[in-house]
Image (cartoon, grey):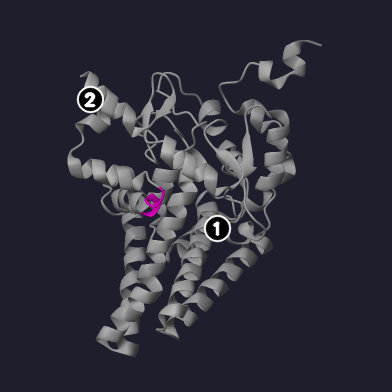
Amino acid sequence: MSIAETNPAQRPRPTGLKPVLEVIPEHCYQRSTVRGLGIITRDFVLYGLSIWGLLSTDDPLLLIPLWIFSGVTVASLFVIGHDAAHDALFDSKRLNWIFGRLTMLPSWHATELWVFGHNRVHHGHTLKQGFDFVWHPSTVEDYARMGRLRRMRHRFEWGPFGAGAYYFREVFFNKMVRFKAPKRWVRVMRRDRLFVAAFLVLSLVVLMLTSGVLGGIWAWVKIIGIPFLLFCQAIGWVVYVHHIDPETRWWPRREWNRFRGQMEGTTILIGPPGWDFFFHWIMVHVPHHVDMQIPCYRLTEAARAIRGAYPDVVIQRKIRVRDYLTAVRTCKLYDFENGKWLRYSAARSEATIS
């Protein structure tokens, strides 16, 4: 038996995902309609309880924990809706269509726009320079061309508290609100935008009719607006830790391949007990990127199979604050030619040399 056969680190890495897909057990693709509906029902119940709690009080000591809980429940609904948007939650495309849209309403996401940006672009070109827009890093040259305000924004968004601001601006506003739909998808994207707009407007009207104009606006801010902003913070952080790490490499187009993007470009992060109750195994991200068709509750088993076959490739560790702080200190700018993350000091050195 050769060294390449006994030592995974010496084995040539594939460029495609076919060898990885072959190690995933077939039953990891089995979907349960009952289980999917059960998760969605539970999440809507928790979301409803958070709304009831917020409508029941204006005490700041109660509002703050209720807002946090509500933001988490919106994130829970979004994550399960994200599974439906991949057509992974149910065998029925109709059920995926219906519940994908319903569960994304509290997070203000138009499903067809999300499908285009997330399924087609992000999953299709993960960590490819100039293609994957999610947490795409700037180069030293990019940073040098920025004005003062853009540099300030970059420093905040790529700092320890900026994930929500980045997600709101880059993913939600630019890709949900400002995005100009390609001709092929204009009709379905317009329909889903109207669906979200109707939810936001009708909820405001109902609240104003039941609580008066000012009371209704305040109630809308409490149960719709602030939970949405907290959702952006939660999901922005989740997406960041999936793909930004000193060990994670972005690739120029000529060097990118699907194995590098999907296997080397993300992680498996283990949260504390109860974590997956709310986040639906989304942190088990490697198998999700290998095959979007795996339902969320099968990702852990698929991850075991993939990690067993590629232990030298898969990054798996516990979620730790110190790892996040290391990333936000280190991962500021990117050198695509040498494949390494840089701090802002690299930009200052470049300016001094120039």
Q: Specify whether 273 is left or right of 124.
A: right
At a point 55% along the width and 58% down the height, the residue shown is 80
Q: CA distance from mark 1 to mark 2?
A: 46 Å
Q: Which residues are magenta?
A: 160-164
Q: Return the disc, 1 or 2, that comes first in the chain's sequence.
A: 1
Tag 1 and tag 2, C-beta contact below 8 Å: no
Q: Is residue 161 magenta?
A: yes
Task: Locate residue 234, reporting x and y percent.
Answer: 46, 56
Check disc 2 and report the residue beneath it: 351
Mark closer to the observer (1, 2): 2
Three-letter code for the amino acid on which mark 2 is drawn: Ala
Q: Quadrant of the N terminus?
A: top right
- The vertical placement of 177 against 25, above or below, is below
Check disc 1 and report the residue beneath it: 80
Task: Locate residue 253, reporting x and y percent.
Answer: 40, 23
Residue furthest right in the image: 1
Residue neighbourhood size for the residue with mark 1, other residues' Cα within 10 Å, grouped as few (<14), some (14–19), many (≥20)? many
- The vertical placement of 245 against 354, above or below, is below
Residue furthest top in the image: 2
Residue neighbourhood size for the residue with mark 2, other residues' Cα within 10 Å, grouped as few (<14), some (14–19), many (≥20)? few
In the foreground, 107 or 165: 165
